[in-house]
Amino acid sequence: MNIDSIKNGYVLDHITAGKAMKIYELLELNKLECQIAIITNARSNKYGRKDMIKIDKLIDIDLDIIGYIDPRTTICIVKNDKIIEKKTLSKPKELINVVSCKNPRCITSVERSLDQVFILKENDKYRCKYCETILEQE
Ligand SMILES: [Zn+2]
């Protein structure tokens, strides 16, 4: 599958090599019925190696999730065989219900109805809004 085979959909490009599966998981792309191609370790002039994901449908994508996993990713939106828009990402200021707090004493582990909220701090790390536990990103 090459880019030409996507009529309407997305190409997620310049993903850091090794992170495509994480994006696939958190975006829950396995729940889609459209064609999805994951390319790992593709050659990149800019970065040496990169991953790519091609999605053959214009679904709603949560850009915050991608920005959280890998802000380097470029999102190309394809309509009628043409790239009509390229989006670059940055780390979202807040992560809401993307990941859960690992602290067993956090209020969110008791109050299941609470949103999981992490706030981006100056040191580029996320902290739980409730208990301030630092989110470790692999
Ligand atoms: Zn917490």
Image: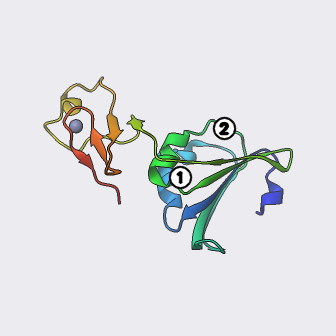
Q: Quadrant of ligand 1?
A: top left
Q: Secondary structure at mark 1?
A: helix
In the rendered view, tell whether residue 39 sits above or below residue 32: below
Judge from the rendering whether residue 99 lies leftward or rightward of residue 81; answer left or right.
left
Q: Residue pushed farthest front?
A: 122
Question: Residue at 26% of width from left, 41% of height from top?
Answer: 101
Q: Pointer 2: what residue?
A: 59
In this picture the colour scheme is: rainbow
Mark on residue 80?
none
Q: According to the image, label 1 marks what residue? A: 24
Quadrant, the N terminus: bottom right
Picture layout, residue 120 above or below residue 19? above
Q: Give amino acid for label 1.
A: Tyr
In-image side of 22 versus 45 (left or right): left
Residue type, label 2? Ile
Disc 2 secondary structure class: loop
